[in-house]
Image (cartoon, grey):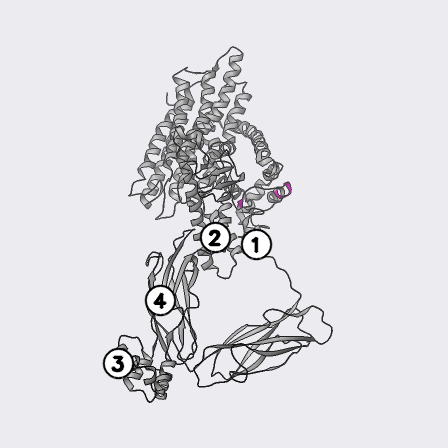
């Protein structure tokens, strides 16, 4: 049922996308292959008993089916109700599927009573047996219709199937066009929901593991979605059986996306020389500073001599900096050397200037064992900031794209053409297509540049919307910069402009466009002609802080291409599970059969495996014979699993025949009738794996669909397959020989009547628990939870008691 194939989805607009889908619908798989596999003992026991008794009716097979149904409905659900952690509930999400399977479950046993006691008392005709079996495909069809919410008149036109767990399953055509049918919009919604799910998980993982690459996060996201998502009935049953026998648990599927987490490690034998970093920003008054040259690689034992020289850019050697050239000597073991450079300070207002430093030649002393070369960056750029100007403030770019996953974006603001004085720079955000509170966090205020500080950031909070195609924009605008009157540097600057009138100078220099000083500026300097300004006032005008060419920036909130591509890959493989419970070779099967749970586990990369308990070893030893026996069954990788399926059914059939005889002989030895043995012992034994599987499903799943819905579905299938097939064969056999197939209605009819009556009460209780007071079929308030479990378990005890008393003739029908 885990078969997959790739289909092409053509969305609106003609955009094609390939997705991996499951061939089998989950509901159909649960009621057909999985039911036939997990309920094979009950079904095969009924068929084998018919053949063993010369095509005459027996008590063991039918009694096991009815007894198993009672155990499933009463005991398993009682257990599932009580194991939910306190304060939690589990509710059936797809109630329509539950109603269908529950109706068929009760009808199946009502139908048994009808054919045994009403239509032809004590005789099963051919048409009754065949009709009983025909109810099986009808059950599957109606459950599928309910699962898909399909309008009956539109069934022939469906181009896709979408299961209740939002997993795409393949249609008849391998190509799906999004514009042809209104219902196909559901598929687009599913893909969009899948993108949101994976995008949300990727963002959370990126916060938890900021050091991991996107490919590593991709693998983690796939595993997390698979582990947290709903599992099939087969998965829980297999895991429960392995837990009961100390077997190996599920592991990452070979070749799955999770394997991409292991980055390739390649060794580079080249020894490299380069600048690190390649760009330096210094103030004009820094004097002397150093730039760094790095040696990196395997061979650092040989002496190496590098030559360097400076080159003018907009800065001129001798005027703005002291030109330099020379050699650097790397001795054995040295990994870095420095070049000392000197900046020339002056009192002139200048634009920011730059010059370059080149590594020009390299000489290796001795014979190197590995290649040695100069690599990029072998040119360093030095930017000189003027310290005589208060600065020009602007954004580096007019438009910036920010990924939604950024969360908190630090918007850079640069100070160029000077860095003198402490400056307060106002800013505010403004709506574009992005709305404050919905797409981003509205903010305003000041950022403060300290003396000689050239860069600050404005924090912009991005509100995650989990939208794959998100593309909205906002604006951030800078106000006029203001100098801090209290700073020591600003005070010194003020004194240097001594000819300025105190109020006018401070108003103009320290708050040229602020509300407080704007009038002073206007009245004193702003309205003067250039020829009326004094030299001090001209200096003040030249040195005041001001806005640059880009005082307003547009921020586009969207997802990065790398992030979107990762989500697309995850969506493409959404139908493919990264966790496998199957094997691909006989060698792997025999290894698992011999190995205890944690020995040689595949989880070593993620940490040590959990130690197996003493009980686990005991169970492993007790069951190792059966594990090795079933290891001979062909692996699931052969013939798409069909060879494994039918081979396993055949082996189960052989074991069922043996177990049936042993159970019957055990009953005879201790004086227990077959009807009682079937109802109590055999039914409990065949349902034990389902008990543990439903328990795990109830705890781990977010809904009660698996733990409750599969019980009702399997009960109906057991009757229609187990009794329908066996009785059809027997009825046809007797009809061919001119006889009638006699089935005394006594024991079975009474058990069916008791079960149906109690089943109605049990289903009614489950539905009443959906009220707001309880909140769901499973869990809920402690008192009600345990009261429900006690009631369900009591129904089973009543069923066992009445069936046993009737079998021994204590009570009559």
Res 463 quadrant in image: bottom left
Q: Which residue is mark 2?
A: 564
Kindly check if marks 1 and 4 are in contact, taking CB atoms under 8 A apart as contact. no
- The mark closer to the camera, 1 or 3, is 3
Q: Which residue is mark 1?
A: 604
Q: Of label 2 and label 1, which has the lower sequence position?
A: 2
Q: How far apart are the two marked residues, 2 and 1, measured between alpha carbons?
A: 31 Å
Chain part drawn in magenta? 579-588
Residue, x 32% and y 39% (percent of image)?
769
Q: Residues within 10 Å of mark 4 (few under 14, many from 20)?
A: some
Residue 272 image offset from top left, x and y in percent = 63, 70
Q: Could you say which is closer to the camera, residue 643 or residue 220?
A: 220
Residue 173 image offset from top left, x and y in percent = 51, 34
Magenta stretch contains residue 509: no
- The mark closer to the camera, 2 or 1, is 2
Q: Which residue is mark 4?
A: 477
Q: Which residue is mark 3?
A: 523
Q: Could you say which is closer to the camera, residue 301 or residue 66?
A: 301
- The mark closer to the camera, 4 or 2, is 4
Q: Is residue 428 visible?
A: yes
SS for callout 3: helix
How many numbered circles does the render carry?
Answer: 4
């Amino acid at each position: 049922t885990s078969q997959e194939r790739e289909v092409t989805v053509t969305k609106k607009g003609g955009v094609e996308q390939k997705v991996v889908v499951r061939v089998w619908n989950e509901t159909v798989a649960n009621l057909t292959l999985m039911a036939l596999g997990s309920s094979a003992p009950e079904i095969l026991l009924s068929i084998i008993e018919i053949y063993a008794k010369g095509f005459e009716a027996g008590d063991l097979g039918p009694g096991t089916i009815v007894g198993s149904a009672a155990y499933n409905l009463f005991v398993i659900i009682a257990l599932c109700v009580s194991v939910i952690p306190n304060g939690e509930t589990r509710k059936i999400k797809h109630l329509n599927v539950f109603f269908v399977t529950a109706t068929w479950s009760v009808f199946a046993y009502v139908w048994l009573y009808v054919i045994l006691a009403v239509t032809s008392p004590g005789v099963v005709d051919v048409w009754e047996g065949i009709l009983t079996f025909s109810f099986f495909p009808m059950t599957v069809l109606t459950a599928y219709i309910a699962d898909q919410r399909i309008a009956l008149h539109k069934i022939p036109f469906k181009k896709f199937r979408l299961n209740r767990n939002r997993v795409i399953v393949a249609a008849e055509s391998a190509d799906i066009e999004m514009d042809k049918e209104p219902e196909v919009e559901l598929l687009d919604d599913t893909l969009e929901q899948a993108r949101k799910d994976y995008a949300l998980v990727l963002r959370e993982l990126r916060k938890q593991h900021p050091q991991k690459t996107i490919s590593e996060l991709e693998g983690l996201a796939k595993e997390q979605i698979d582990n947290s998502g709903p599992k099939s009935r087969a998965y829980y049953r297999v895991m429960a059986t392995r837990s009961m026998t100390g077997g190996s648990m599920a592991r990452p599927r070979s070749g799955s996306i999770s394997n991409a987490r292991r980055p390739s490690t390649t060794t580079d034998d080249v020894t490299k020389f380069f600048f690190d970093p390649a760009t330096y920003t210094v103030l004009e008054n820094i004097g002397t500073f150093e730039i760094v040259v790095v040696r990196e690689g395997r061979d650092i034992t040989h002496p190496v001599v590098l030559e360097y020289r400076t080159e003018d850019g907009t800065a001129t050697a001798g005027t703005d900096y002291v030109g330099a050239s020379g050699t650097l000597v790397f001795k054995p073991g040295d990994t870095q050397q420095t070049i000392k450079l000197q900046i020339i300070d002056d009192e002139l207002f200048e634009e920011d200037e730059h010059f370059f430093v080149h590594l020009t030649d390299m000489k290796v002393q001795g014979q190197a064992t590995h290649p040695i070369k100069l690599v990029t960056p072998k040119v360093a750029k030095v930017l000189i900031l003027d310290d005589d100007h208060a600065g020009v403030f602007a954004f580096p770019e007019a438009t910036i794209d920010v990924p939604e996953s950024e969360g908190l974006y630090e918007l850079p603001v640069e100070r160029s053409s000077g860095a003198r004085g402490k400056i307060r720079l106002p800013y505010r955000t403004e709506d574009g297509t992005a709305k404050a509170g919905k797409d981003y966090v509205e903010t305003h205020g000041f950022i403060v540049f300290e003396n000689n500080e050239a860069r600050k950031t404005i924090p912009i909070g991005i509100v995650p919307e989990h939208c794959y195609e998100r593309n909205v924009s906002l604006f951030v605008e800078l106000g006029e910069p203001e100098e801090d009157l209290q700073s020591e540097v600003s005070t010194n600057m003020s004194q240097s402009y001594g000819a300025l009138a105190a109020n006018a100078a401070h108003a103009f220099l320290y708050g040229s466009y602020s509300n407080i000083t704007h009038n002073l500026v206007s009245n004193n300097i702003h309205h003067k002609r250039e020829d009326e300004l004094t030299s001090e006032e001209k200096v003040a005008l030249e040195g005041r802080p001001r806005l640059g060419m880009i005082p307003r920036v547009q921020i586009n909130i969207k997802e990065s291409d790398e992030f979107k591509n990762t989500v697309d890959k995850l969506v493409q493989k959404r139908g493919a599970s990264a966790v496998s419970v199957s094997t691909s070779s006989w060698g792997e099967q025999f290894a698992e059969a011999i190995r205890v749970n944690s020995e040689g586990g595949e989880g070593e990369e993620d940490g040590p495996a959990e130690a197996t308990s003493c009980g686990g070893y005991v169970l492993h030893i007790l069951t190792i014979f059966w594990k090795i026996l079933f290891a001979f069954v062909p692996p699931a990788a052969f013939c798409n699993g069909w060879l494994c399926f039918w081979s396993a059914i055949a082996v189960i059939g052989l074991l069922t025949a043996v177990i049936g005889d042993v159970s019957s002989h055990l009953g005879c030895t201790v004086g227990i009738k077959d009807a009682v043995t079937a109802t109590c012992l055999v039914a409990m034994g065949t349902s034990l794996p389902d008990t543990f599987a439903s328990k795990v499903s109830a705890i781990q799943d977010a809904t009660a669909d698996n733990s409750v819905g599969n019980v009702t579905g399997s009960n109906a299938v057991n009757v229609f397959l187990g009794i329908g097939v066996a009785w059809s064969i027997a009825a046809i056999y007797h009809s061919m020989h001119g006889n009638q197939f006699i089935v005394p209605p006594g024991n079975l009819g009474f058990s069916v009547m008791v079960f149906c009556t109690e089943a109605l009460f049990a289903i009614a209780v489950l539905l009443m628990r959906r009220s707001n007071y309880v909140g769901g079929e499973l869990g809920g308030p402690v008192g009600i939870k345990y009261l429900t479990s006690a009631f369900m378990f009591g129904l089973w005890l009543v069923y066992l008691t009445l069936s046993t008393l009737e079998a021994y003739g204590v009570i009559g029908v």
